[in-house]
Image (cartoon, coloured by chain):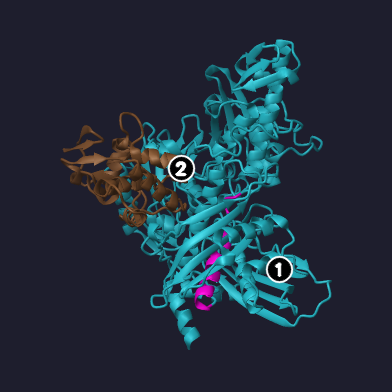
Amino acid sequence: MTAVARSDRRRFLRQSGGFTLAFSLPLPSGLAQAPSEPAKARLPGSLDRNRRLDAWIRVQPADRSILLMVGKVELGQGILTALAQLCADELDVNIERIRIVSGDTAVVPNEGTTAGSFSMPDSGNAVRHAAAEARAALLELASMRLAVPASSLRVDDALVVADTGARTTYWDLPAGEELRREATGKVPPKRSGHRYIGRSVPRLDLTPKILGQAMFVHELRPEGLLFGRVVRPSTYRARLLAADTAAVERMPGVVKVVRDGSFLGVVAQRESQANAAAEALARSCRWETPSTLPRTEGVEAWLRSAPIARDIPTRRQPRTKPGEVIRTVEATYFRPYQMHASIGPSAAVATMGADGTLVVQTHSQSVFETATAIAAMLGLPRERVRLQHVQGAGCYGHNLADDAAADAALLAVQVPGRPVRFQYTREQEHRWEPYGSAMLIRTRAGLDAQGNVLDWDFELWSTPHTTRPANQPGNLLPAGYLGKPFVQPVPANNGAPNYAADRNAIALYDFPGQNVLTHFITEMPVRVSSHRGLGAYGNVFAIESFMDELAHATGSDPAEYRVRHLNDPRARDAIRAAADRFGWSTWKRTPGRGRGIAFARYKNIAGYCAVALEVEVDSRSGSIRVLRAVASADSGHIVSPDGVSNQIEGGLVQSLSWTLKEEVQMDETRILSEDWASYPILTFSEVPPVDVVLIDRPGQPFLGTGEASQGPTGAALANAVFDATGVRFRRLPLTPARVLQGLRERRA
Amino acid sequence: MTRFTLNGRAVQMALPSGEPLLQVLANDLGADGPKYGCGKAQCGSCTVLMDGNPVRSCVMPLSAADGRTITTLAGLAEGGRPGRLQQAFIDEQAAQCGYCTSGIILQAQALLQRNPKPSDAQVRSALDGNLCRCGAHNRIVRAVLRAAKGA
C-alpha cells in the first residue's frame, strides 16, 4: 500500500464528519490522525496504519458479542475464520461471540488489498495485538471495579474472575471509553494456552454455503432490484461507431439503455430481459476493431521484440569467491497468458441512494482503492461512494471483480433509487479479465568441477503483473470506453521486497554470483494484472526447472542438489519433508513414469513450500497423468492447520491445471478462449491424491500461504515429465500435442 | 402457468415458459444455491435435481419444470438439520470459495441415489462435468465417500 492511499483515507475521514447517519455503525470520532504528527513507534501488521483499538474491536453488551472489523476480505481462503480464531484466543471469549464486519469502506480499517499472501502478516498480526491489548484494557477496568490486582484475574468466555472469587464480565465494563484510544503495541500476545490458534476450527462461511443460504453477491435480492448487463466489443481497443439504442429501449422490461462513448449497457426489470436486450444491442452495433493482438503462437516472439520500457537490475551480485567455471549451461523458458478463470462470472450490486451516496456491494479485493477509482470515474466526491465486500466466487488475483463494480455503478447512477445487480456473461469473464502475464526467461549457470553453481544469470521479459484499480479510474475497464475516457496509467513493477514481474526471480540458493535482470515491458496487447503468484509462477518454473537440468547434467540427485545449495535451514527442511513423505530415496523406477521435485519460498519472504510428484506419460497420446503429489509447507506459526493445508493443496491443483492445460488463445482481433470448452481446466478425474506435510513453527511470524505452492508445482511437474521421458519441456503448458512433438523431436 | 414442486413445496409461476429455470429459482423463488456459471451447461454451478436427476438449470426453460419435482441445495436438509451429504461436506470442510458447491452436492446426491457405495473413481467420474477452480476436488471426493459410508 502506498502513502497516497493513506492520505486519501485521512481526507475521506476529515470530510466524512456529517455522513454517519447513512451508516449502521458510526465511525469512532477522532479516528483520523493529523497529517503532520511526529513519527510513532511501528505497530504490528495493519495496526500501524489504523492505530485506534476501537477501529478493530468493540465490546457489544447488547448481544454479548465482540465486533471485529477488518479490512481484509474472505475470498474462499478462510481468512475471516483465522482472524476470528486469533481474536477469540487473545480476548478469551468463545469464537461464537465474534461478529465480523469485513471490507465495508464506511466501517472497517483500511488494510489495502487482500492479496500477496499478506493477510496473516497484515491483518493477523493487527487483530492479535489489538485483541491482546483490548483484553489488558478490560482487565484494568475489571481490576478497578473488583478492587483486586489485574494480575489476579482470569477470563473465561468474557467472565472475569479474581482469585478472591469476585467476578464481573466484559459486558459490564465501560469498554467503549477504554478502547477509544490508540494501540501501544506493548501488550504481547499469548505465548501458550491457546484454545483456537493451532486448531482447525470449521470455517465460519462454509456451513451456510453448504446449506444453500445466501452468501454471495450474485444472490443479493434487495427490494426493487433491477438487472444490468453491458455490451463489449470484440477486442480491447475497438471504438463504437453505431448502435440502435432506440430499438432496444422499446424491448419488454427495458428500463434504460446507456450509451456513453463506446460504453454500452442496459438495465431491465428481469434478468432474462436484460440478457435479451444486451444481445439485441450487441447485434445492432458497428465497431471499429483494430488488429492489435499478437496471436497465440506469436506471443513469445512479441515478447522478444517488444519495446522495453525499463531494464531493472533486480539483483546484482558479482562473484567474489574464486573458482573456475568448467562448464556453462543455458536454457530458455516460456509461460503463456493464463486466466484466473473464476467459476462465477464477476458481479456487483450498486444503488444510487436518495442521499446522493452510491453503495456498491462487490467482491473486490481492494474496496477502498476501488471506491476512490469509481468516485473519480463518476465525478462523485469520494465520501459519496461506499463499497461493501460481499463474497463472490474465488478470484485468485485481480479478475473482473472491480470492473463489475464499476459497470454496476455506471448503470446504477442512471436509475437512482433502484438497486442494479450486474453480472458478466461467461464469455465476457473469459475474454475481458486481466490475464496473468506471459513471460520469457533465459537462464545461464557456470558450474565448477563438482557441479556446483558459481555464476547464475537470470534474465526475464514480461509485461506488467499489476493493473489493480489503485485509486485510478483509468484502471477500471469501462472507464476507458466512456465518451470522456480515462486513460490507463502506465503500470509500475513493484520493487523489493515483494516485486511483481520479478517476484521470486532471485533464487533463494546461495550462489556465489547471481545476477537477475528484468526487461519490463509496459505495452500491453493483452489485458494483464495480478494472477495468483504474479511473476513467481514463471520465475520459479524457470529456476526450478533449471536446477533440475543442472542436477541431471552433473549426475546429482535433484533433491540433494538443491539442499546442497541452500544455507537456510527452513528451506532445507521443507525440501526434505516433501522428499521424505514422497519416499524419494526409496522410489523405484518403472517405464513411462517419472518423479520431480521443486521448491520455493514465496517472494523469498513468505511461506516455504516444496512439491514432489509422480507422473505417467503416455507416449502414444502425449497425455500426462499426475499419479500423486506431496507438498510441504512452512508458513511460520500455524493458526489453522486445515486452512493452510486447503490453500497449499488448492494452489497445487490449480497450478497443475495451469501447467498441463492452460494458455489463452487469440488471433489478431479477438480472444478465442471464451468458455470452458475453449479454455479447459483440470477436472475431478485428473486431480491426483495430494498429501500436505505441515511444518509448524510455534512462536515464529505468520508467513502467508495462499500462493506458496503455485511455482514449485509447475516445475515439479515438468521435472517429473523429464524424468519419465528424457525430454525437457521448457514451454508451458505441457499439452499432449506439445509432449508428442517433444517425443518426436527426441526420436529424430 | 407452470406448476411444480420445489423442495417439497408446491409452487406456480405465471411467467413466460421460456424463462431460464435458473433465473426463476434464484430471482423469483429465492432458492439460493444454484448459480450462474457459464449458461452453456459446461460447469455445473447451476445444477438442480429434477425428479431426482441432475439437470443444468441454466439451459432449462421454466416449462421443463412443469409437473416435476425440483430439489435445490436447501431441499437436502432433513428436519431442519443438514442432509447427510451436506453434513459430510461440513465435516470434511470440502470447499474453498463455495461457488461450485451447490451444483456439486446435488450432482453427488444423484450419484448416491443411483449408486449408494461408489468407488473413488466413480465419484470423480460422476463429478467430471462440475468444475471447481479452487482445487478442493479431493476434499469433495472424500466428503461424498464419507456420506456414502455413513449410509
Residue farthest bottom in this picture: A748
* Quadrant where the C terminus of chain B is found in the figure: top left
Q: Amino acid at mark 1?
A: Val
Give x and y (percent) for residue A501.
Answer: 63, 62
Q: Which residues are magenta?
A: A705-727
| Of B50 and A407, the residue lying toward us | B50
- Determine if residue A335 is in view: no
Judge left or right: residue A318 versus residue A532. Answer: right
Judge left or right: residue A559 versus residue A364. Answer: right
Q: Amino acid at mark 2?
A: Gln
Give x and y (percent) for residue B109.
Answer: 30, 45
- What number is the disc on residue A516? 1
Q: Tell me if mark 1 has few (under 14), some (14-19) or many (20+) residues whose alpha carbon lies within 10 angstroms of its own.
A: many
Tell me, yes or no, whether dots 1 and 2 are on the same chain: no
Q: Is A369 above or below relative to A302?
A: above
**Dominant SS type (magenta):** helix
| Of A579 and A95, the residue lying toward us | A579
* Quadrant where the N terminus of chain B is found in the figure: top left
Give x and y (percent) for residue A346.
Answer: 44, 49
Q: Chain of mark 1?
A: A
**SS label for mark 2:** loop
Judge left or right: residue A26 versus residue A272. Answer: right
- What number is the disc on residue B93? 2
Q: Colour of chain B?
A: brown
| Mark closer to the observer (1, 2) | 2
